[in-house]
Image: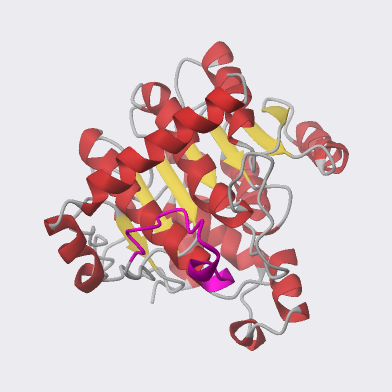
Amino acid sequence: MVSLATIRASNVLLSTHLPSSPTILFIGATSGISLSILQHISQYADAPHIYSVARPPSAPAHQALLSILQEQHPTSTYTLIEADPTLLSSIPKITSTLTTHESKLDMLIFSAGHLSFEGRANTAEGLDPGMALGYYSRLLTLHSLLPLLNKSPNPRVLSVLAGGMEAPLNESDLDLREPENWSVMAAAFQGATMGTLSLEHLAQQNPELSIVHWAPGVVDTPSLARARKFGVPAAAAEAMSAEEAGERGLFYVTSERYSVNDGIVPIEDGVEKATKSAGGIFLVGADGESKDSEAVLAPMRERGVPTKVWEFTLGIFEETLKLGGD
């Protein structure tokens, strides 16, 4: 396990190692893990350009928080993008904001998610909201912002979901549209596994891009409170604080330990480089160690499933954005 002391020692070095004026996009930072990462980056970064997405109901409170951070760090820039990432038709607004105002993107951090404990209630675009947030909107955003990421000297992506917890896919119904194929957990594992396969696909096409798919475990966030309300067994476990999770997330997105090339912060003596999956990304568990999902992923790669998943995903993008008028 990577100790919290090691993580904190690395994060402190950001103040001297992180290049000035990094550009960072958060999707899911209105609460929980990503909010904590945002606050820690604000503490250490030199004049960052931070963009944060909030849905309309959360936007006023999030803007108030960003305004406080702006007062505390006057050389920084904080931009709220009001959009609902559950809807793929909202993603072009997010990505165009970045491409209009920035020449590069250094970090892209996702943590927005949803578990449909009440049953599947599709979005206005016909998608399961959990898969929309945990998979489709993340991959559409990443795919759209690859040109900006590739202009960064050290581009990093952190997807907070379920790295290392991949499971066999329902390959005949990737979107789980048939009622008998859908359940809360089936959708969660389907989206997480499709996420890993598609992240690997993009990593292979963009070899300078460092991608971490992290499963943080049980963390004290509003999502945990909701899971406990519905009696989810795993939610009864002892929870990591959002503060610690934020420090860990910052470490995973900045340390050389999880970088395909040189990291932003060099790893300490005695700390080994994390092992990538055979597909080229870092699958990281709650303890910060690499997870091995090759027993599940390797047979799918051999059968060409990643290509099938990505082509299906591109079809969903095209169909949904066309329906949305974009």
Q: How is the image coloured?
A: secondary structure
Q: Nearer the viewer, residue 261 or 276?
A: 276
Q: Does residue 137 appear to the left or right of 84 in the view shown? A: left
Q: Quick check: can you spot residue 49?
A: no
Look at the image and say whether residue 183 sits in the magenta stretch: yes
Q: Position of residue 278 (x, y in %)?
A: 17, 57
Quadrant of the frame with the C terminus? top right
Looking at this rendering, what residue extends furthest in the left direction? 302
Q: Position of residue 128 (x, y in %)?
A: 59, 53
Q: Does residue 198 appear to the left or right of 4 in the view shown? A: left
Q: Position of residue 65 (x, y in %)?
A: 81, 42
Q: Is residue 173 above or below residue 98?
A: below
Q: Magenta residues: mostly which secondary structure? A: loop
Residue 262 quadrant: top left
Q: Nearer the viewer, residue 277 or 295?
A: 295
Q: Is residue 70 above or below residue 310?
A: above
Identify the residue at image location x=54%, y=53%.
131
Q: Is residue 132 above or below residue 72?
A: below
Identify the residue at image location x=58%, y=13%.
101
Q: Quick check: can you spot residue 80?
A: yes
Residue 162 quadrant: bottom left
Identify the residue at image location x=35%, y=47%.
211
Quadrant of the frame with the N terminus? bottom left
Q: Is residue 138 above or below residue 283?
A: above
Residue 224 quadrant: bottom right
Q: Position of residue 288 (x, y in %)?
A: 40, 68
Q: Which residues are magenta?
A: 169-185
